[in-house]
Amino acid sequence: MDKPKLFTVGPTYVNEDVREEMKRQMFSHRSSDYVKLHSELIEKLREFLNTENEIFIYTSSSTGCMESGVRNMISDGGTGLSTICGAFGKRFGEIIEQNGRKLVESEVEWGEANRGEQLDEVLSKNPGVEVVTITHCETSTGLLNPLDELCKVAKEHDVLTMVDTVSSMSGTRIEIDKLGIDFCFFGVQKCFSVPPGLAIAAVSKKAMEKAETVKNRGHYFDFLNLKKYNDKNMIPYTPPIPQMFGLSKQLDMITDEGAGNRFYRHSKISARVRNGCKDLGFGVFPDEKYAAPTLSCISNPLEVDLAEMNSKMKERGFILASGYGKIKDMTFRIGNMGNVTLDDVNEMLENLEEVVG
């Protein structure tokens, strides 16, 4: 891995093969060359995601997908429920309200997981909810929510599901169709290790049918317009073609590695990060039963000056991530997404020991 070595939580390190692929010459996004690129990329994504759902390529960050899901899947003036255990679940709720929809929250303390029992209770008290939003991997706290039980409860209440897999997709197994996820989205800049600027969503038939009934879906993120162009292997708006080249190449490399091997690698390396930090006297912020396999949120019982620590690590060529939101000053985060290896982590931990020792 080139220095400085990135242990951030996105964007992540982009390897040389992907960077080289992104140097290819441009062509019109209305040309036959683009149609070929688009169709091949959709098929690669479908194979990796193992889904029969519609796959949309978004010319935005993942937050654009959040707004798209809200505008298309919740009736104008209707109600959405946001499950919250950190900053990004909270953001989903804010987007619901900012787009003129009503918000119900199912919130737990940061560091705890959203659980099915609480969701069931909140949905039972709010029968008008149309959609539940779920943050699979809460990037602010390093926690992986139990997606299976949350989706099961949502399905029992016959509400649609929007699932943020931004920090988990391609770092752990996510069975979109088996879980019945209606809108599953992610960006390319985290576990896929492609430069930012592109987001992907898998959209169920039920979600598409709901969009047909929703007024005021907006323009840029309208499901029906996206599908109209998708059926022609195009996007309504000018896409970042270099990122599409890069994602296509990365999907080939993931196939070569094997999805199962990739998921195991992320889990093993994440455990090494947590154990290594605990050996140095730090703590793990979230409930470790739900610790994410793609990043670690580390607490600071040592009362180390975290800003100074991160600065010294950067001088040594290792870039860690600061804490986020209301736990910004009491935690730091270490990402192991995408191309991070065990050797990279071991070298980083050796340097961290010297910095804090």
Image (cartoon, rainbow, N blue to C red):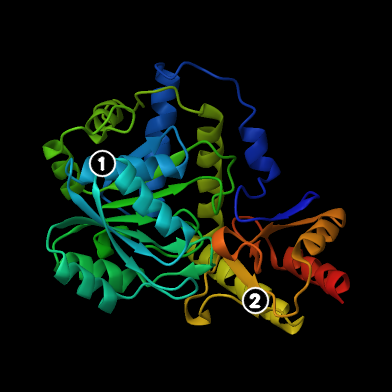
Q: Is residue 244 above or below residue 315?
A: above
Rendering quarter of residue 43: top left
**Type of the residue with mark 2:** Arg
Q: Which residue is located at x 65 percent, y 80 percent?
A: 283
Nearest the eye: 106 or 343: 106
For the residue marked with disc 1, what is the amino acid?
Gly
Query: What residue is drawn where x is 16% and y is 34%?
Result: 215
Please name the residue that numbered disc 1 is placed on: 100
Q: Dot 2: few (<14), some (14–19), or many (≥20) neighbours within 10 Å?
A: many
First along the sequence among labels 1 and 2: 1
Judge depth for marks 1 and 2 and give the one in front. 1
Is 212 left, or right, of 19 in this rendering?
A: left
Which structural element holds mark 2? Answer: helix
Camera-side residue: 202 or 75?
Answer: 75
Where is residue 290 drawn, in percent x and y?
A: 47, 76
Q: Which residue is drawn at the image coordinates 86% and 69% (left, top)?
A: 355
**Label for residue 223?**
none
Q: Is residue 170 above or below residue 55?
A: below
Total marks in image: 2
For the residue labelled by badge 1, is the local secondary structure a helix, a strand or a loop?
Answer: loop
Q: Using residue 88 as the reference point, say whether residue 155 is left or right of it.
A: left
Q: Quadrant of the C terminus?
A: bottom right
Q: Residue 152: x, y in percent?
A: 23, 70
- Side of 325 where 120 appears, left or right: left
- Left or right of residue 333, residue 141 in this image: left
Q: Tag on residue 274?
A: 2
Residue 305 placed where, x, y %? 79, 67
**Alpha-carbon span between mark 1 and mark 2:** 41 Å
Residue 157: x and y in percent read: 14, 66
Disc 1 to disc 2: CB gap under 8 Å: no
Q: Residue at x 81, y 55 (%)?
A: 314
